[in-house]
Each structure stands twice: as C-alpha cells, then as structure tokens.
Amino acid sequence: MKWGIGLFLAILLLTGCNSGNAFTKINKSESFLATVNIKDTSLTFIDENYHPFAKWDISEPFTGALLLADKDTILLYGKEMEKVQVYSLSAGKLINSWKIGKGIVNMQLLRDGKSIVAVNQSNHSIHFLNADGEEQDIVKVGKSPLTVLQGEEANRLYVINFGDTKCSVINLETKKVDFEFPVHSSSTGSLLREEKDEIWIGGHGDGDQVEEDLYIYSAKNGRVEEKAEGPHHADKVPGEC
C-alpha cells in the first residue's frame, strides 16, 4: 500500500513538472503572428486569418520577445528577470536560459542574423551576444537606454536613452561609442531613414509637459534638421511598427 501511494505521488509530481513546460507546438514553416500579453505573462499565436490558435502561459514576468533567424528559437526577456528564457516553437518547450541579469527591456537581432543586442537599464549598457547567448561585448551608454536602431550603411547602432537627454551612437565594428548628440527628455518612438540621412524621434515629454513635436536629426552628426508638429505623446512616428 505504501509502495502504491509512493508510486502515485511520483507519477503525479512527474506529470506536473512536464505539463508546466509543455506548450502547443508551433509549425515554423507556417505564417503566424505572436502577441506578447504582459498582464497575464502569455504569448498568443494567431494564424494568417487572424484567428488565435495557441496560447502559451509563461510563469515568468516577461515584457518582450525576440524571434531569431532560424524562425524557431524565441527569446523571452523582462526587466525583473535574471535570465533570458529560450524556447523552441517547434518543440513547444523551454530549451535553454541565458543568465544576463535583471534590467533587460529590449532585445534586437542585428542584420547579420547572428548578433543580438540586449538593452540593460540596470547598468545603462548595451550587451552584445552571439546566437548562443554568449556575451561578446558590453558598451556603456546614457541613463535608462530603451530604443535601438541599426544603421546598415554606416554600421552603427543608435541608442535612445529614455532617462537621459542624449542619443548614443555605437560603432558596430569597434563596439565603442562614436559620438552622442542631445535629444529631448523621455524620447522613445523613432525612425531611421538612412537614405535621407535622417532620424525621426518623438517622445512622452518631461513631467506634465507633453511633447507635441517630432524632431528630425542628421544620422551622420546628430544635428537638428527640422521640427515637425505631431500628435500628443508623439512616441510613435510615421512608419514605426
């Protein structure tokens, strides 16, 4: 009898552990959209007809996701997470975790398809990682970096620091800050137009002062080229997704 109860408890424990890590498998060869649901920490998968077909409930306080070049590996990150969680869509499960530390608010895959940047607000830095999550470089920037834009022609990374009044421009070859230029407080939404040598930047404004304008800067030297009137809270600019 004791043996039977022990076996039952072992099976129950094993089943509980497995069910917590297994999700609906996603066919990476089929078109889909995925939404990050911050409130209930879940991912919802939507087919090309805009019908939800799967939901992953994640027991981590993640605030963003990044799909890698293989179209199967997805990274989940959040400011309060010690590790970046690495999932396989086709396997429907957690396959790895990268210990980067708390503070990650944004991650982007660079155009080479191999390098990843992680924006860390805890140490005000940009972490450069390879596709295996191994840290290659760390570059200090301004306070509370948030938005990053890759310039392909000049091989630069533009970092807009939400908690500062400057944009840091990193040389992607040397992994050093080439120069910085002043921007308005709490700048967020942005668009890089290299063919026109322009960066469009909007923002929330400072305190009770709502930012109503978009500022157009030179991508080469950061000089203000033009100011355009925009809607209240211009933290989304034309063409930005």
Image: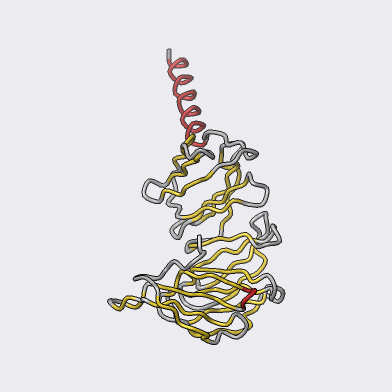
Q: What residue sits 67% from the left and 55% below the top? A: 131
Residue nearest the observer in this picture, 28 or 92 = 28
User: In the rendered view, how is the structure colored?
Assistant: secondary structure
Query: Residue 75, how many percent across, how many down?
Result: 56, 51
Q: Is residue 158 left or right of residue 121?
A: right
Task: Using the image, determine if residue 236 lies above or below residue 226.
Answer: above
Residue most extreme to the left: 208
Residue in view at x 44 percent, y 76 percent: 214
The x and y percentages for residue 79 are 45, 60
**Quarter of the rendering containing residue 194:** bottom right
Q: What residue appears at the point 51 percent right and 38 percent down from the top-left corner?
A: 49
Q: Position of residue 80 (x, y in %)?
A: 43, 58
Name which residue lies at 57% across and 71% down: 192
Residue 148 place in picture, x, y as percent: 55, 69
Marker count (numbered):
0
Specify the quadrant of the image occupied by residue 111.
bottom right
Q: Quadrant of the N terminus?
A: top left
Q: Quadrant of residue 114?
A: bottom right
